[in-house]
Amino acid sequence: MPPLTIRTYKTALPSFLFISALMTLSLSGCASTPDKKGEHIHVAPVAQMFRPAQEALHRGDYDQAIRQFENLQTEYPYGPYSEQSQLDTAYAYYRSGDSKAAAAAASAFIKAHPANPHVVYAYYLKALAEYEGIEGPEYTPTPDYQALNTFTYLAKTFPKTPYAVSARLHIAKIIDILGQRNLNICKFYYIRDAYVASANRCSRVITDYQLSPAREEALYYLSKSYLHLNLNQQARTTAAILHANYPQGRFTKRLRSLWEHAPKASTAYVG
């Protein structure tokens, strides 16, 4: 499996999860299912249905792979081939660009097979598919929170897997996006003289997204909002915190007169 990587808003999926043990399985004879008239219709053995579907997946014919995997699940709803085909279906949807269908297929697998040894891959695929829906800090944050929740669950539940490493990288990126989004809202309120709303949004950046680069500017606008609300002590305290955390920052320099006169006790580092 190649290294897991992360790119802005979009990400690369590790190579197709291949369970080699399945390829050693074989079923002799043929199966049959009754049609509506009670007559039996010939059904190919599961291994014979699985093989061409996987070949289609490997050559990048995702639509064909999806159809064949779903046909297999219809004819053989139980067993290892069926479980693998469900994972492969989610993967094929993801690679074809249908992230919503990929997330839905991965969720269905998780619900149906929570004890499957490869369920962590399903969680990872679900999170990646949700991550694909993130458009940036200017857009609706719904996919951001969905991906954040799934990645967080994966990292906490399966901390020693390689997927957890990638999940933590994605979490950091999502926090950056959400922090910037809330900062943008803070500034939106600030320039419209809605200082209470501005202060509330800035506080959210500082408390909820502490690792986001947006926190520095949020401290600045929080201090400025306090000034406009005549909360001078809070403004000085916030300016001092900004100075303690970002002593050389450009926003720190703008509030020099505030943090220089702040009480010593208020200059504690906020980590």
Image (cartoon, helix red, strand yellow):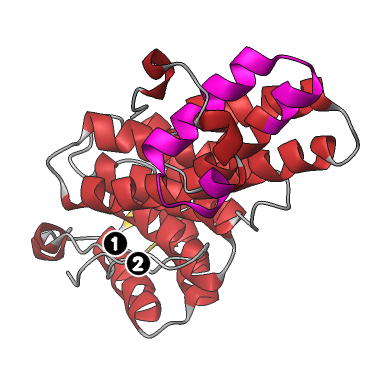
* Relative to 233, 23 lies left or right: left
Q: Quadrant of residue 140?
A: top right
Q: Residue at x 60, y 52 (%)?
A: 100
Query: In the rendered picture of this protein, how many numbered marks are placed on residues?
Result: 2
Measure the alpha-carbon separation of dots 2 and 1: 7 Å
Residue denoted by label 1? 45
Question: Residue 147 in the image: x percent, y percent?
Answer: 49, 43
Q: Residue at x 60, y 39 (%)?
A: 255
Hey, what amino acid is under mark 2? Met
Q: Quadrant of the C terminus?
A: top left
What kind of secondary structure does the magenta stretch mostly adopt?
A: helix
Mark 2 in CB contact with mark 1 (< 8 angstroms): yes
Hey, what amino acid is under mark 1? Pro
Q: Quadrant of residue 185?
A: top right
Q: Residue at x 49, y 74 (%)?
A: 62
Q: Secondary structure at mark 1?
A: loop
> Where are the magenta residues, as a range?
224-253
Kindly identify which numbered label has been placed on residue 2.
none
Q: Quadrant of the N terminus?
A: bottom left
Residue 71 on the magenta span: no
Question: Residue 83 in the image: x percent, y percent?
Answer: 31, 47
Res. 240 visible in picture = yes
Kindly identify which numbered label has been placed on residue 49.
2
Res. 32 visible in picture = no
* Relative to 136, 80 lies left or right: left
Image vertical order of residue 237 relative to residue 149, above or below:
above
Q: Residue at x 12, y 59 (%)?
A: 25
* Relative to 240, 97 lies left or right: right
**Quick one: 152 or 91, which is closer to the camera?**
152
